[in-house]
Image (spheres, grey):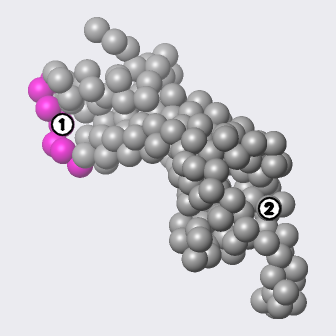
Amino acid sequence: KMKHPLDFIPDRVRRPLFLALLVWTVGLFAVLQALNRPLITDAAPNGIVSFELARTPEKAREVLASWEPQSNPPLGFLLIKPYHVAFGLGLDYLFMPAYAIAIALGVLLAMRRHKGWFASLGAWLGWGSLAAALFDAVENYALFRVLLGEGFRYSAAAAASATIKFGLILPGLAYALVGALLPKSGKQAEK
């Protein structure tokens, strides 16, 4: 039977640690969303996510071109968007362990409420949440390479990594939420 990667954390610490990481993750997410707002253009309707999922060198070039400095910037501030993007990608390296561990802890808390196949699935999703951060790091490395003009060929690697990352994050989030909302099962319900 596979063990959850954070199973070593004592029971009494899990919930407070989860709540602290959840607050930190939501705070960093809010900052990243604020950084993303100016990056929303016709070529990048989802801002940085459009860049992450560009897939082709042509699409990546189109997104980057839409982020060129504006001749008449709002509020008189000249925003050099590629530097803005680089700052956001750097900040994302703080976000990665925060969300990965928060999701993995959420999964662990949910799986401890249940047994059987649902608990077994939680162990896999806990590992998946941590793996998502690794794919996120690869994605960001590839995006930095594109941003620095060192090769638009990295667009495909960034898109593949981003797709896998989202494919690992979303099931973990859904599991943690569903597991927390479902009534406790078996012996856990008797405690």
Q: Is residue 182 one of those drawn in magenta?
A: yes
Give the x, y percent position of residue 61: 69, 59
Q: Is residue 112 visible?
A: no
* Residue 116 visible: yes
- Name which quarter of the figure residue 48 lies in: bottom right
- From the image, tell me which residue sits under label 2: 82
Residue at 34% over, 41% down: 171
Looking at the image, tell me whether mark 1 or mark 2 is earlier in sequence order. 2
Which residue bears the numbered disc 1?
A: 184
Give the residue at x 31% y 28%.
122
The numbered mark at residue 16 is none
| Camera-nearest residue between 8 and 74 | 74
Estimate how packed mark 2 is, as few (under 14), some (14 to 19) or many (20 or more) residues with alpha carbons within 10 Å: some
Q: Residue at x 51, y 35 (%)?
A: 132
Q: Position of residue 63 (x, y in %)?
A: 65, 64
Give the residues drawn in magenta, as a range.
180-187
Q: Is residue 167 magenta?
A: no
